[in-house]
Image (cartoon, rainbow, N blue to C red):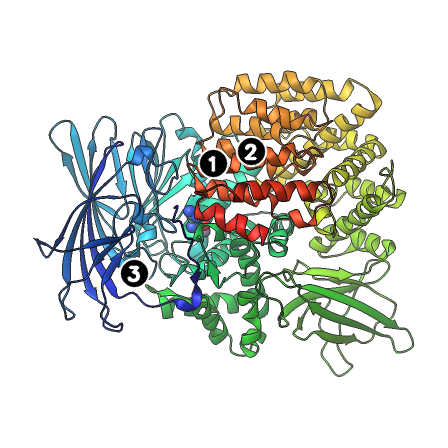
């Protein structure tokens, strides 16, 4: 959307629509070059709103005809908005017929109706429906849809839309038709159609109530055997939502369709989910464990939207987190409940927190910082963000912590009793949670809790402890603050659930009691911090404890606490809370990394201490801990996370320090890595479950470490073994990990392996994406990555217009490879600005994501800072930028 003057939309300007649309009857004559769309709607005035003209949204449409109640009528176009001024007075319904055409084949934005590999798809959220027909394109207008699709039968044998197929048949000239009726009213962003040559995996299920349903997954012929995992995930999702929240499937037919051209992950269109192939297709030979687990969580996510998003939707797009935060929370819980072992739940939690801290915390501290319910936006697509999604999910998790698991289920029940079929706000949701749990801290302090919805930024909780041996008391003072964010200078204190325990020097849990007349609290307790400063005094504490604070990451905050190395080692060795046990190891590593980064002169050759290395050896060799957890503990904090701790960032220095740390860890634990690799490789027939995935992950890390060590000592043994392992691998996880070990350690054998990998998988787009991403994301050695990236863009398989492929090369370099992207000669930034501009010409959404890569430029050390600013200014100077990119760039320079 290139509207000379970007308009800022404000939450407080919300007004109910002037008209309601009750029914929509759409007919499509599908043709890639020119598709004809006839839209017959019944509308009526909204009696609660002053009489006014009807203004229908449209974008890139060719308008052929408008009819009112079967006759011609007057209308005008105000920019792209269709305006009808002389509509019948009174509250009687009237009928509008709008006939338009559009050009799906030319639709490179992938919003609205587009063609991907010869198949028609739609993407309407947030504002894509206006690219299909003139409409009130806003989520609070809900209508009943009937959709007739007509197309060439040979080229488009499968014709799908939302709801139930009520009629199909032949037409003249080799064309055919299908008519679909959706029994549920819906906002237009949930509309979908698909037409093409596809095949489906079908599964009939009977749910608790005895109702039969048809589940289908549609893919291109040849991909069918890669849909088993997605189908299993879908079946489990249906069962889980009914068992955990009493939410049944409300459709006779539930379809998922995969497309290889998709801007995002997937879309929850009612009864017709459309997915990026990346989150549907998975076979052991082509998908990694991470892919398998992503497929499960995205299938779950979109399915869970059927209630949280579709049955109850958003009043306006400022409420996006109403459905997204809640649905991410639900998919996270689903993935945890799917784990057989309790320890695997903790692993999933750690992984989710890692995403939050490496992606959302920087967003919250940068120019695009926004509350989970923002007050303004220019382009809503820019707000499909880690804040709305992942921080939104953390806010929902805090609600569950405050009201308990059962209280949360009660709250959700009340929410649906009150709002089923409505378009509502975040306030409505939280009110239902509070009303269902009237004695909870949430209900008692609701206005304060709601600050999580209105304030941006990551709060910092500072913890200060004092042990009084004579009194046998331990007092913990917690204070909170939150740095200013754009447009929000002053922050009010949050309501923060702080789950904690106290551990003695031997690792035993200390019983908790707040004041001698108070009840015993067990060994794990959630304090509610609601003031700027608050002191909690624990009594009957026999020896000075080690505090384990923010267990399970009970709130999305930065915990600022001074713990000695000895205390952290105690927690790492003994904490009963797996999250804090992992966190203790991360804090130890982070401290060593920061010391090395801040040191004068060249980075130290051996940043890691013996105590740290011994602790890591103990974890690696631990007889009880499971492999997945070990892999997380033994993975150093990411470069991005290290950068977030610093006021001035030198990405190359951080990279150099972290690489040195990795090498030291590789060498110091050489024998242990050898043991770990041998003990965890070869897991028999491939199963994607968390336990076997954890074993593969640890074997993979071990192999990388052994190849890294080989780089230092020059021994060909482990690189040779890695290549052999690569060749013999029985599944993609092992194969990819072996390749990664060679590439990330810069082994000459990597070239051979990369060539073999490409030859083996040249027909498989998702695997080739991995091949590109691995090379663009490889550790920089003397500035070699940028030239390699430019070379990759010349590869016959590179396609800029395919978002997955563009991301695999360009994003892997600009967003995920800081040591290579931030160059002294600014060439990485020049490359970035060229690509932002290039992408923006045909796909603003993807371009705007890339534009975020330099969000934190103000923190960069020189010469990076000035060079980054210049590159951003170069993009800003370009006329005709999309609103998407313009908003990101403007905020970045502000
Ligand atoms: N609602 C979808 C999901 O979270 C995401 C759609 C985003 N689309 C977009 N154009 N921004 O599952
Ligand atoms: Zn979603």
Q: Residue at 66% across / 30% down in the picture?
A: 778
Q: Position of residue 550 (x, y in %)?
A: 70, 62
Q: Residue furthest right?
A: 470
| Distance in Å between CA atoms under marks 3 and 1 | 33 Å
Q: Nearer the observer, disc 2 or disc 1?
A: 1
In this figure, which residue is indicated by the disc labeled 1? 839
Position of 498 relative to 610 (above/below) = below
Quadrant in the picture for the C terminus: bottom right
Q: Nearer the observer, disc 3 or disc 1?
A: 1
Residue contact between numbered discs 2 and 1, judged by CB atoms under 8 Å: yes
Q: Residue at 83% across / 55% down in the picture?
A: 570
In this figure, which residue is indicated by the disc labeled 2? 810
The disc, 2 or 1, on the residue closer to the chain's N-terminal end is 2
Q: Identify which residue, 495 or 229, lies in the foreground.
A: 495
Relative side of 420 to 877, left or right: left
| Distance in Å between CA atoms under marks 2 and 1 | 11 Å
Q: Residue at 80% across / 35% down in the picture?
A: 660
In this figure, which residue is indicated by the disc labeled 3? 141
Tag 3: Cα neighbours inside 10 Å, few (<14), some, or many (≥20)? many
The disc, 3 or 1, on the residue closer to the chain's N-terminal end is 3
Relative side of 375 to 706, left or right: left
Figure label count: 3
Position of 390 relative to 276 (above/below) = below
| Residue 577 visible in the displayed image | yes
Q: Identify which residue, 513 or 782, lies in the foreground.
A: 782
Position of 748 relative to 72 (above/below) = above
Q: Position of residue 686 (x, y in %)?
A: 56, 31
- Regarding mark 3 in the picture, which secondary structure is present there? loop
| Residue 626 visible in the displayed image | no
The answer to which quarter of the image holds residue 445 is bottom right
């Amino acid at each position: 959307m290139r509207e000379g003057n970007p308009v800022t939309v404000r939450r407080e300007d919300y007004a109910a629509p002037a008209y309601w649309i009750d029914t929509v009857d759409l007919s499509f004559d599908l043709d890639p070059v020119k598709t004809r769309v006839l839209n017959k709607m019944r509308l009526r005035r909204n009696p609660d709103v002053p009489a006014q003209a009807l203004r229908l949204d449209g974008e890139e449409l060719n308008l052929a005809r408008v009819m009112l109640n079967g006759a011609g009528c007057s209308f005008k176009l105000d920019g792209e908005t269709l305006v009808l001024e002389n509509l019948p007075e009174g509250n009687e319904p009237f009928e509008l017929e709008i006939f338009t055409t559009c050009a799906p084949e030319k639709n490179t934005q992938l919003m609205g109706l587009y063609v991907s590999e010869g198949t028609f798809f739609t993407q309407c959220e947030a504002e894509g429906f206006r690219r299909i027909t003139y409409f009130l394109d806003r989520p609070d207008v809900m209508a009943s849809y009937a959709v007739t699709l007509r197309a060439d039968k040979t080229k488009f044998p499968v014709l799908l839309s939302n709801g139930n197929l009520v009629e199909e048949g032949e037409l003249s000239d080799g064309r055919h038709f299908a008519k679909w009726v959706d029994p549920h009213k819906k906002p237009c962003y949930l509309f979908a159609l698909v037409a093409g040559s596809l095949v489906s995996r079908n599964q009939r299920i009977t749910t608790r109530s005895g109702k039969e349903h048809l589940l289908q997954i549609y893919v291109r012929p040849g991909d069918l055997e890669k849909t088993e995992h997605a189908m299993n995930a879908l079946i489990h999702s249906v069962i889980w939502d009914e068992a955990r929240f009493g939410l049944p499937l409300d459709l006779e037919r539930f379809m998922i369709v995969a497309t290889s051209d998709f801007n995002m992950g997937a879309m929850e269109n009612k009864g017709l989910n459309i997915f990026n192939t990346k989150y549907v297709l998975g076979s052991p030979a082509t998908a990694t464990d991470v892919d398998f687990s992503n497929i499960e969580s995205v299938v779950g996510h979109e399915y869970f939207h059927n209630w949280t998003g579709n049955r109850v939707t958003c009043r306006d797009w400022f409420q996006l987190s109403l459905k997204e935060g809640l649905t991410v929370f639900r998919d996270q819980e689903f993935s945890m409940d799917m784990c057989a072992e309790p320890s695997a739940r903790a692993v999933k939690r750690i992984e989710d927190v890692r995403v939050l801290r490496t992606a959302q915390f920087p967003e919250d501290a940068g120019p695009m910082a926004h509350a989970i319910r923002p007050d303004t936006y220019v382009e809503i697509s820019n707000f499909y963000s880690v804040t709305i999604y992942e921080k939104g999910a953390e806010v929902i998790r805090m609600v569950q912590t405050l009201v308990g698991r059962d209280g949360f289920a009660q709250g959700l029940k009340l929410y649906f009793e009150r709002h089923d079929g409505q378009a509502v706000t975040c306030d409505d949701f939280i009110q239902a949670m509070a009303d269902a749990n009237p004695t909870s801290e949430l209900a008692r302090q609701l206005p304060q809790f709601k600050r999580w919805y209105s304030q941006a930024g990551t709060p910092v909780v500072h913890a200060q402890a004092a042990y009084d041996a004579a009194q046998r008391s331990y007092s913990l003072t917690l204070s909170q603050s939150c740095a200013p964010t754009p447009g929000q200078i002053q922050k009010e204190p949050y309501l923060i659930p702080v789950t904690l325990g106290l551990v003695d020097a031997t690792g035993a849990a200390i019983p908790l009691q707040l004041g001698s007349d108070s009840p015993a609290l067990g060994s794990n307790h959630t304090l509610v911090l609601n003031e700027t400063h608050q002191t909690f005094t624990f009594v009957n504490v026999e020896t000075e404890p080690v505090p384990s604070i923010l267990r399970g990451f009970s709130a999305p905050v930065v915990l600022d606490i001074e713990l000695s190395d000895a205390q952290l080692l105690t927690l790492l060795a003994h904490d009963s809370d797996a999250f804090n046990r992992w966190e203790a190891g991360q804090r130890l590593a982070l401290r060593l990394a920061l010391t090395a980064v801040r040191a004068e002169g060249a980075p130290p050759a051996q940043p890691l201490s013996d105590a740290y290395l011994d602790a890591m050896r103990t974890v690696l060799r631990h007889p009880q801990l499971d492999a997945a957890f070990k892999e997380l503990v033994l993975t150093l904090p990411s470069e991005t996370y290290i950068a977030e701790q610093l006021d001035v960032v030198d990405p190359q220095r951080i990279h150099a320090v972290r690489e040195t740390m990795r090498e030291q860890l590789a060498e110091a634990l050489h024998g242990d890595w050898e043991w770990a690799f041998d003990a965890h490789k070869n897991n028999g027939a491939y199963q994607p479950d968390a336990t076997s995935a954890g074993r593969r992950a640890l074997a993979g890390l071990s192999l990388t470490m052994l190849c890294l060590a080989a780089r230092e000592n020059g021994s060909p043994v482990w690189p040779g073994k890695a290549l052999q392992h690569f060749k013999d691998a029985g599944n993609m996880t092992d194969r990819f990990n072996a390749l990664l070990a060679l590439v990330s350690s810069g082994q000459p054998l990597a070239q051979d392996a990369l060539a073999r990998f490409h030859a083996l998988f040249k027909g498989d787009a998702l695997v080739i994406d991995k091949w590109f991403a691995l090379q663009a994301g490889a550790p920089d050695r003397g500035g070699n990555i940028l030239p390699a990236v430019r070379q990759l863009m010349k590869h016959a398989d590179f396609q800029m217009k395919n978002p997955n492929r563009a991301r695999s090369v360009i994003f892997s370099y600009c967003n995920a490879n800081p040591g290579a992207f931030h160059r002294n000669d600014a060439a990485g930034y020049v490359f970035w600005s060229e690509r932002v501009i290039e992408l923006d010409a045909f796909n603003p959404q993807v371009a705007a994501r890339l534009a975020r890569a330099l969000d934190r430029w103000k923190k960069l050390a020189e010469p990076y800072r000035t060079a980054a600013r210049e590159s951003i200014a170069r993009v800003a100077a370009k006329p005709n930028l999309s609103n998407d990119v313009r908003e990101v760039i403007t905020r970045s320079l502000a």
